């Protein structure tokens, strides 16, 4: 095998002498994929560069590595008690990413590489140029560094994220809420208005700086807190700290109210509607207690289950004569946390539905600033199967929100259980470790440009490494998430 002559194509980093040799191309060579034997230190996921005699330097990525031997099972059984030598090579399958032409467009070589071409470990500048990784720190969210290439920072375009929505998917414990915390820190730093639905109250710690570690220095991050830029609202002020979140009862229909109760609608809808209609004729605002008084005046024992459920809703304290003003919740450049810790699931759904509806309507009329709505545990509020009162409005935001500057960020540990219409509208996808076959299938179906090797790698990703695709990222990239500036609030509870 002879080394190909390396020509200079007008760029400063074309001298092969400074590059590290890692393999030689052999066997059948295609224009999109080739195999090389591994002679240096090469791992799955590494970037390599090869000189193409017509198109110059081309970037590729190791998709799979195999150890190939001439030892068959029969031979191994025969020889197991003797000394023997086995011929083996380590072979890498490389997927061709391409090269930038003179206009800066990403192109594929249209003819295969020469067999015998030397494969080099790719230079960082070359990787950045071919992939199109840009330093957009002014308008970008700094989420981490290219996996195994700690000198290459990755920024996600915040405008693209708000305009075209985001999904964060991973199995439990893979680092979803840590990463969501990183994104929220970036929103706060760039004065992006955001509202986060926080079912576990884990984002309140964004107020508190994290402890400084060696990683902070390596990633160029300093611990800090965002106390002055965070407002917390909660429907249950007895359980959680925060301003009360209430909804106006008179804006609810009798059917919507009945949907919150575990009751047969056929039996109770008419009396409830009659009571609410009666109150509407005499006053603009009324409370659950008012509705109960009207029903009690009927002196009908059959209404007792309805009265008990109304009493339960009254105790939840979610309705009032006047609800919390959305202008108070949404404040320009600030993060509003809706802390739903300990709130029953039906009430959580109601909060997400009412709040999302109000945000959508007010954004349409430009009464509140453009914003990002972040929904944790999205499989609960927008399930693929069954009914949830919040699914419809979240679908509407996913399909129409971009026109009005209302972005959606969906987070879930069960991608297969999230409404497909909503997931398919999320243009920026951040995927951490996933192992469930149904979830992997859902991801494979919704992410463009995922290779077989990448789908396999998703199952083995270490905590804190994510596959990022869409938005301003031109192709799926593995990213090592940067350390948090603020304290992570989602630590698991230690039993011992
Ligand atoms: N990028 C990271 N760097 C360092 N540690 C991390 C990183 N991401 C996650 N961790 C750690 O891994 C653990 C799990 O992370 P996290 O709480 O974000 O998981 P999760 O996917 O949100 O889990 P759950 O679904 O149970 O809420 C935490 O202890 C967290 O500190």
Image (cartoon, grey):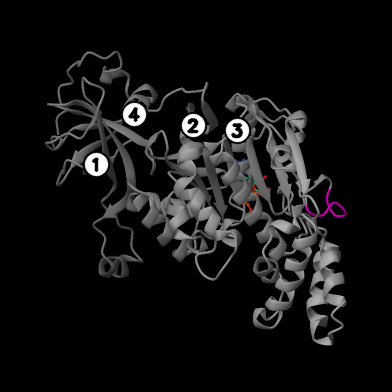
Q: Earlier in the sequence, mark 2 or mark 1?
A: 1
Q: Which of marks 2 and 3 is nearer the N terminus?
A: 2
The image position of residue 87, as x and y in percent, is 26, 51
Number of residues whose C-alpha sits closer than 10 Å to that of mark 1, classed few (under 14), some (14–19) or many (20 or more): many
Q: Is the magenta stretch mostly helix, strand or loop?
A: loop
The image position of residue 418, as x and y in percent, is 51, 60
Residue topped by disc 4? 122
Q: Which of marks 2 and 3 is in front?
A: 3
Q: Is mark 1 within 8 Å of ligand 1?
A: no
For the record, the magenta segment spans 235-240
Whole-Å distance between the Cαs marked 2 and 3?
14 Å
Residue 223 horizontal side relative to residue 56, left or right: right
- 299 drawn magenta: no
Residue 159 has which mark? 2
Q: What element carries label 3?
A: loop
Residue topped by disc 1? 36
Whole-Å distance between the Cαs marked 4 and 2?
31 Å
Q: Which of marks 4 and 1 is in front?
A: 4
Q: Which of 230 and 390 is in front in this view?
A: 390
Q: Residue at x 17, y 40 (%)?
A: 31
The image position of residue 347, as x and y in percent, is 72, 62
The image position of residue 251, as x and y in percent, is 69, 56
Q: Do the residues labelled 4 and 2 touch (CB within 8 Å)?
A: no
Q: Is mark 4 on a helix, strand or loop?
A: loop
Q: Which of marks 1 and 3 is nearer the N terminus?
A: 1
Residue topped by disc 3? 369
């Amino acid at each position: 095998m002879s080394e190909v002559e390396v020509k200079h194509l007008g760029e400063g980093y074309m001298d092969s002498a400074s590059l590290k040799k890692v393999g030689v191309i052999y066997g059948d060579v295609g224009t999109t994929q080739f195999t090389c034997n591994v002679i240096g230190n090469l791992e799955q996921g590494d970037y390599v560069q090869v000189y193409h005699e017509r198109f110059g330097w081309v970037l590729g990525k190791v998709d799979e590595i195999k150890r190939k031997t001439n030892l068959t099972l029969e031979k191994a059984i025969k020889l197991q008690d003797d000394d023997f030598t086995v011929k083996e090579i380590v072979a890498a399958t490389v997927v061709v990413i391409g090269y930038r032409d003179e206009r800066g467009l990403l192109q594929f070589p249209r003819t295969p590489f020469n067999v015998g071409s030397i494969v080099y470990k790719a230079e960082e500048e070359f990787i950045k140029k071919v992939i199109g990784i840009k330093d957009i720190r002014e308008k970008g969210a700094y989420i981490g560094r290219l996996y195994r290439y700690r000198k290459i920072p990755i920024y996600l375009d915040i405008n693209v994220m708000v305009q075209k929505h985001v999904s964060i998917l991973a199995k439990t414990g893979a680092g979803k809420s840590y990463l969501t915390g990183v994104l929220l820190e970036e929103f706060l730093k760039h004065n992006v208005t955001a509202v986060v639905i926080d079912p576990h109250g884990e984002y309140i710690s964004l107020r508190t700086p994290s402890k400084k570690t060696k990683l902070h220095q390596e990633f160029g991050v300093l611990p800090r807190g965002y106390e002055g830029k965070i407002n917390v609202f909660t429907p249950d002020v007895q359980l959680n700290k925060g301003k009360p979140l209430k909804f106006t009862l008179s804006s609810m229909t009798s059917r919507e109210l009945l949907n919150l109760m575990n009751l047969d609608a056929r039996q109770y809808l008419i009396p409830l509607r009659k009571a609410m209609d009666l109150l509407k004729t005499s006053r603009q605002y009324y409370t659950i207690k008012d509705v109960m008084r009207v029903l009690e005046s009927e002196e009908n024992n059959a209404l007792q289950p309805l009265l008990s459920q109304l009493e339960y809703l009254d105790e939840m304290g979610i309705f009032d004569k006047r609800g919390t003003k959305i202008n108070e919740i949404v404040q320009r450049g600030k993060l509003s946390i809706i802390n739903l810790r300990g709130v029953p699931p039906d009430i959580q759904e109601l909060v997400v539905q009412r709040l999302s509806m109000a945000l959508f309507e007010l954004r349409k009329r430009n009464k509140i600033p453009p914003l990002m709505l972040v929904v944790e545990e999205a499989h609960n509020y927008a399930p693929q199967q069954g009914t949830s009162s919040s699914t419809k409005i979240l679908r509407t935001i996913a399909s129409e929100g971009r026109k009005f500057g209302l972005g959606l960020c969906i987070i879930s540990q069960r991608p297969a259980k999230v409404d497909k219409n909503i997931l398919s509208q999320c243009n920026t996808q951040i995927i951490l470790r996933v192992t469930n076959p149904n979830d992997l299938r859902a991801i494979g179906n919704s992410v463009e440009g995922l290779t077989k090797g990448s789908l396999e790698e998703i199952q083995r990703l270490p905590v804190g490494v994510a596959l990022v695709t869409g938005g301003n990222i031109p192709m799926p990239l593995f990213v090592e998430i940067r350390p948090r500036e603020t304290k992570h609030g989602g630590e698991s509870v230690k039993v011992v």
